[in-house]
Amino acid sequence: MYHLGRKLLSAKRFKGAITALLGLAIALPSLAADTPSLDKINDRGTLRVGMSTFVPWAMRNTQGELIGFEIDVAKRLAADSGWKVEFVPTAWDGIIPALLAQKFDVIIGGMSVTPERSKSVLFTTPYSHSGVQVAANRELADGFSEFSDFNSRRVKIAARRGAFTVQVARETFPKAKILQFDDDAQAFQEVINGNAHAVIASSPKPEHEAVKNSDKLFIPFTERLSKGNEAFAVRLGESDKQAFFDNWIQARTDDGWLSERYEYWFSTLDWQSQVATGQ
């Protein structure tokens, strides 16, 4: 019985050892897959950024080089982190699938945080806040500087038919008459011609049109009517990368760099001469 018990114990130990080895073999691929995502970028020495061209977020200059707000952000992030940067232009409708397929490390492309997108990607802290703004006719809206000035039955506000801005206009100025047009160009022209007090549109269109038509238009509010939340996007589970980017965004927010760059690209047209025609 003693020898039989020892044999049974040895068999159990052998089986346990085999089970442990099999478990380790199965776990090894998972351990490799769980290598911190920042280590991969550091080993490569290059941050690969997915983006789409869209004025003024990212566009081509007359030499064919990428410029724009997102380009400035990605370049500064890479420089601060000791990396090179590689841009991977990607069609907008395929940019999240391309990220998940590991075509690049991060999306820096003016992507708004939404509950639906959050099911597929991990968002950082927002680094910019675009939104909706108003451009007003200098003569008709002379002296208007408060929301209440435009919330009157005597006021006409132009907007693009079917756009989110129509909803914002109705919620912000419920008493005003909302005039709807097929595109933004028609809506802005209506205000320039003096047939409406103001036009509501997504930034940076109002700011840029006010610069182009400074004799006819002005921006009455320092704050936008609604704020978007644009953030970097990384793959689910890449919390180390998310935390690293969050810290960088906080530092560049605190020192005013992100705000300064945003205002340059969204509130001025000082960069327009650099841009290739057709964008």
Image: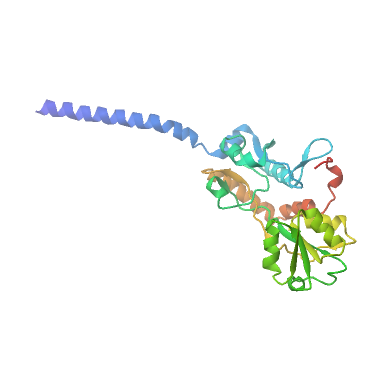
Q: Look at the image and tell me in which quarter the C terminus lies.
A: top right
Q: Residue at (13%, 26%) from the top-left corner? A: 4
Number of labelled discs? 0
Observer-nearest of 90 and 25: 90
When asked about the image quadrant of residue 273, the answer is: top right
Q: Residue at (17%, 26%) from the top-left corner? A: 7
Residue 173 in the image: state x and y as whole percent.
71, 69
Residue 241 in the image: state x and y as whole percent.
57, 44
Task: Using residue 50 as the reference point, say whether residue 136 is left or right of it.
Answer: right
Task: Using residue 192 as the reference point, say whether residue 170 is left or right of it.
Answer: left
Task: Using residue 201 as the reference point, say whether residue 107 is left or right of it.
Answer: left
Observer-nearest of 62 and 210: 210
Observer-nearest of 212 and 173: 173
Image colouring? rainbow
When asked about the image quadrant of residue 219, the answer is: bottom right
**Looking at the image, which residue sits at the far right?**
215
Observer-nearest of 216 and 13: 216
Residue 267 in the image: state x and y as whole percent.
79, 55
Q: Against 36, is 173 above or below?
A: below
**Looking at the image, which residue sits at the far left?**
1
Q: Residue at (84%, 63%) from the top-left corner? A: 218
Residue 102 in the image: state x and y as whole percent.
58, 35
Q: Look at the image and tell me in which quarter the N terminus lies.
A: top left
